[in-house]
Amino acid sequence: MVKAYKQLHMAPRELIKDCLKHKKEAQRELYNLYAAPMLGVCYRYTKSLEDAEDVLQEGFIKVFAKLDQFKHDGELGAWIRRIMVTTAINYLQKHSRYKKQMQVDDMKLHPVSVENPEINLDTKDLIELIVQLPTGYQTIFNLVAIEGYDQVEVSKMLGMNINTVRSQYSRARAMLVVKLEQYSSPKMQVQRGTI
């Protein structure tokens, strides 16, 4: 039966319908379709692949539990992504090692360069630089710059003052600029073997 799902490349409505009937093959197909990209979403919010996998698992449990609420008025992948983002934020707030890091105090930052350095950077490297940010900055940067939420929405999602969100987003961008400049420095390019 699993082969039949893969051969048919079922329309999302049919796949959802079968998932709602608790058909294991359909649930497996839905998971297989979205697990890899959603793991990437989860990883952007956590500091380890192990935590990202935990968020992914918890997120898919919610996806299957709430699948009857999907309205078919948008893309299924976008709906699943919202669940994963919310699950990741809840995970960060629930686990003490992240919760402490979500409250980033004022810290001295290097001045931001107004120059645009020539940077040869692939997506994987950029994500690694984002993951190096303090958790609070990383979370806010992901929500605003990558997920496309506005800062007011992020403020409500995280239960933070809007000025704190704006400040942390600005600082996250400044820290990324510094990291990008370091990444693109001739010394680092030699170490990576790109020169």
Image (cartoon, rainbow, N blue to C red):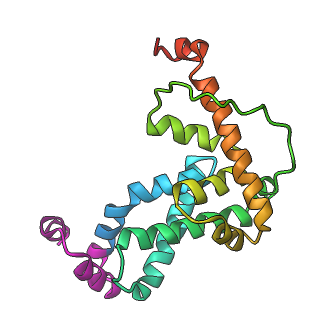
Residue that extends furthest to the front in the rendered view of this protein: 114
* Residue occupying image coordinates x 17% and y 68%: 9
Q: Can you give x and y, in whole percent of width and height, for residue 180 in the image?
A: 60, 31
Q: Can you give x and y, in whole percent of width and height, for residue 74 in the image?
A: 36, 77
Describe residue 114's horizontal placement relative to residue 159 as left or right: left
Q: Can you give x and y, in whole percent of width and height, for residue 177 in the image?
A: 64, 35
- Region rendered in magenta: 1-26
* Residue occupying image coordinates x 53% and y 42%: 127
Describe residue 65's horizontal placement relative to residue 52 as left or right: left
Describe residue 86's horizontal placement relative to residue 10 as left or right: right
Task: Give above or below for 43 relative to 185.
Answer: below
Examine the image and state in which quarter residue 110 appears.
Answer: top right
**Residue in front for this viewpoint, 194 or 24:** 194
Examine the image and state in which quarter residue 52 appears.
Answer: bottom right
Tell me if residue 6 is in the magenta stretch: yes
Tell me if residue 5 is in the magenta stretch: yes
Describe residue 175's horizontal placement relative to residue 64 as left or right: right
